[in-house]
Amino acid sequence: MKGEFSLKLRNKQIGLMFFILSSLFVYSCFMSGDSAQVLSNEDFIRFHVVANSNSPEDQELKLLVRDELLKCINEGLAAETMAIAGPKQSKVALDIDRSKEFIEENLTELEKEARVILSREGFNYPVKANLDVAWIPQKTYGNLTFPAGNYNALTVTIGEGQGENWWCVLFPPLCLIGLDPEGDGEMEDLYREAILDDKYSVLLEESEEPKTLKLEFKVLELLKQ
């Protein structure tokens, strides 16, 4: 009996290993085309502001917090990007790693700024900002639909966080373009350059019909699904 049990267990282990290896092979074949041009869930940073509740007051507060934090992020990224520019560089590339690093280093500042806005409006809700991988259902931004899956996301939660959330794409910086119409356009050019990278060109393709992005997801996510 013991030997028979061990044999069954070993057969199950071999079967599981075969399944994983088969999945890895299928995934590698799927990605073997022009992989440099294929977008994945890891190529984006989402930005979500979650309201305390769905009351009109809380929803309005959510939008006020959104506007001010977007300005803070825009100004901070501009300063950060220009600070690393060398004297001989005419342009500095804005990339997702630099953006993530800036956000991570300034989570506390974003929370403080949000609390200042709430206090100014007569509310004392707590605020929590975090940058983490989060499961996000399918959502549409403009005429682009992002499939459900795990994404890097900056999430700012106001109070109980029981209200509807506002969201945008923070990288590539779709929700930062046009924030400073009276500026010199330097950061605007930088943001557009990031989006116009061949990797992200699909985001700017004109289409009369709404379209759903086809993103590659991690092997573990494929197995889970």
Image (spheres, rainbow, N blue to C red):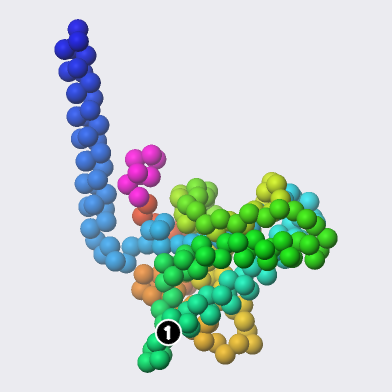
Q: Main secondary structure of the magenta part?
A: helix
Q: Quadrant of residue 205?
A: bottom left
For residue 94, side relative to residue 71 (left or right):
left
Q: Is residue 195 visible?
A: yes
Query: In x, y percent, where is residue 173?
Result: 51, 71
Quadrant in which the N terminus appears:
top left
Q: Quadrant of residue 70?
A: bottom right
Q: Residue at x 26, y 42 (%)?
A: 23
Task: Decide: is 184 above or below 113.
Answer: below
Query: In x, y percent, where is residue 43?
Result: 41, 62
Q: Residue furthest top?
A: 1
The answer to whether residue 191 is magenta is no
Q: Amino acid at mark 1?
A: Ala
Query: Disc 1 designates what residue?
Result: 85
Closer to us: 162 or 126: 126
Query: In x, y percent, where is residue 96?
Result: 43, 67
Quadrant in which the C terminus appears:
top left
Task: Decide: is 178 above or below 101.
Answer: below
Q: Residue at x 73, y 49 (%)?
A: 53
Query: In x, y percent, where is residue 195?
Result: 44, 74
For residue 167, side relative to residue 123 (left or right):
left
Q: Is residue 167 visible?
A: no
Task: Decide: is 85 above or below 66.
Answer: below
The answer to whether residue 220 is magenta is yes
Q: Residue furthest right?
A: 122
What is the magenta range?
Answer: 218-225
Task: Decide: is 67 above or below 6.
Answer: below
Q: Residue at x 26, y 53 (%)?
A: 30
